[in-house]
Image (cartoon, grey):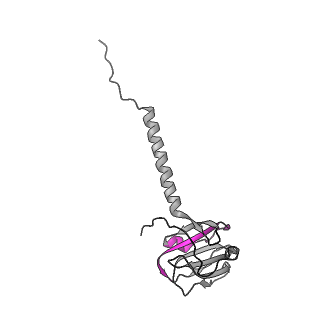
Amino acid sequence: MSQQKPSLPTRDKKGKGFFFLLFLILSILSGTAAFSRKYLKIFLPDGSSLTAELALTDKERQEGLMFREKIDWDQGMLFVFKREGIHSFWMKNMRFPIDILWLDREKRIVHLEIDVPPCTKDPCPSYSTSNSALFVLELKAGSVARHRLKLYDKIEFVLPELKD
């Protein structure tokens, strides 16, 4: 009498492929969500656009563009604050000059600082405005002139859904 070994269930190769594909799709979608939370498209009044990195957390706002080598014409950094208020900036550990735009809750420019140089020695000067702002946009030095930006111009962008 011969004994038959019970057969173990075999893994279906199609099942493996399905789960791998599902994993891949979910990874891409979560990466896209993270990317879209980290960057957004900014539209300027002259019809041009640029991609801005978002500074949402206290740490991101404190670091800003520090230690970066450069910023291109089609790049920027948008600082998003929890409340409209007076927000000061300095250029410590910066390696290149920038233009700084303070925007109110309507995304209108309420103050401009043009061609702000890197800080070369302490104490570093602080740049601020007496007008309340909810956003601050840092751009490559010369961008204000290049795009003919002026006070009360409206900058267009749509923030991703932000969690407190």
Q: Is residue 48 left or right of residue 88?
A: right
Furthest residue to the top?
1
The residue sitting at 60% across, 84% down in the picture is: 126
In the rendered image, which quarter is residue 162 located in?
bottom left
**Is 163 situated above or below 125?**
above
Count of labels in the image: 0
**Is 26 situated above or below 47?**
above
The residue sitting at 60% across, 78% down in the picture is: 153
Residue 67 forms part of the magenta stretch: yes
The residue sitting at 56% across, 76% down in the picture is: 136
Percent across and percent down for residue 116 are 66, 80
Furthest residue to the left?
1
Q: Is residue 1 left or right of residue 119?
A: left
The N terminus is located in which quarter?
Answer: top left
Q: In this view, does 16 lie to the left or right of 64?
A: left
**Is 154 situated above or below 19?**
below
Percent across and percent down for residue 133 are 52, 80
The C terminus is located in which quarter?
Answer: bottom left
The residue sitting at 48% across, 54% down in the picture is: 30
In the rendered image, which quarter is residue 130 located in?
bottom right
Magenta part of the protein: which range?
58-87
In the rendered image, which quarter is residue 76 located in?
bottom right
Front residue of this view, candidates 127 and 8: 127
Furthest residue to the bottom?
130
Residue 73 forms part of the magenta stretch: yes
Percent across and percent down for residue 132 are 51, 83
Front residue of this view, candidates 64 and 121: 64
Percent across and percent down for residue 75 are 63, 66
